[in-house]
Amino acid sequence: MLGTRNINHRNFYVHEEPKEEVVEEKKINKPVEEEVLVEEDINEAELMYQELIDLTKKEQIEKLESFGMDKKDIRKLRYEEDRVNKLFELMNR
C-alpha cells in the first residue's frame, strides 16, 4: 500500500541553533558597503546641473526661450546634453 512506512524515530536529524561565536564571526567578515553620497557632498554647480538634466525636454526648451534664444537656435540643440550645457552656460552669465 502507498503511504505506509515503518519510520525509525532514532534516525531523525535534530536541528540545533548555530553557536553565537560562529554568528559573530560571520558578522565581522561581511564586506562593508560603500557610503552613498549625500546631496551636501555635491557642490552647488553639480546640483544645479543635475536639476537641469531632470527637467523634461519641453521644460528645457521653455527655459531656453525664457533666456531669449530663438527657436532656430534651440532646434540646433538636438541632444539633451547640448540643451543642458547651453542652459548651464546661460544661467552662469
Image: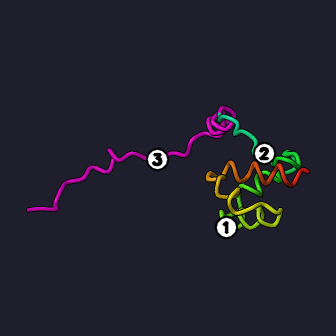
Q: Mark 1 touching mark 3, by CB under 8 A?
A: no
Q: Residue 21 magenta-drawn?
A: yes
The residue lying toward the viewer, choosing from 7 and 84, is: 84
Residue designated by label 3: 15
Q: Residue drawn 79% across and 54% down? A: 87
Element under label 2? Answer: loop
Magenta span: 1-29
Badge 2 density bin: few <14, some 14–19, many ≥20, Cα 10 Å: few
Q: Residue drawn 27% across and 49% down? A: 8
Residue designated by label 1: 58
Q: Any mark on residue 89, and which?
A: none
Quadrant including the N terminus: bottom left
The residue lying toward the viewer, choosing from 83 and 32, is: 83
Badge 1 density bin: few <14, some 14–19, many ≥20, Cα 10 Å: few
Q: Residue drawn 32% across and 44% down? A: 11
Q: Earlier in the sequence, mark 2 or mark 1?
A: 2
Distance in Å between CA atoms under marks 2 and 1 = 29 Å
Q: Is residue 29 left or right of residue 15?
A: right
Q: Earlier in the sequence, mark 3 or mark 2?
A: 3
Corner quadrant of residue 35: top right
Badge 3 density bin: few <14, some 14–19, many ≥20, Cα 10 Å: few
- Identify residue type, mark 1: Lys
Residue designated by label 2: 37
Question: On screen, 92 above or below 68?
Answer: above
- Identify residue type, mark 3: His
Residue 68 is situated, as x and y percent measured from the top left of the image, at 82, 63
Rendering colour mode: rainbow
Q: Given this view, does label 1 or label 3 mark the residue nearer the observer?
A: 1
Element under label 1? Answer: helix
Which residue is outermost to the left? 1
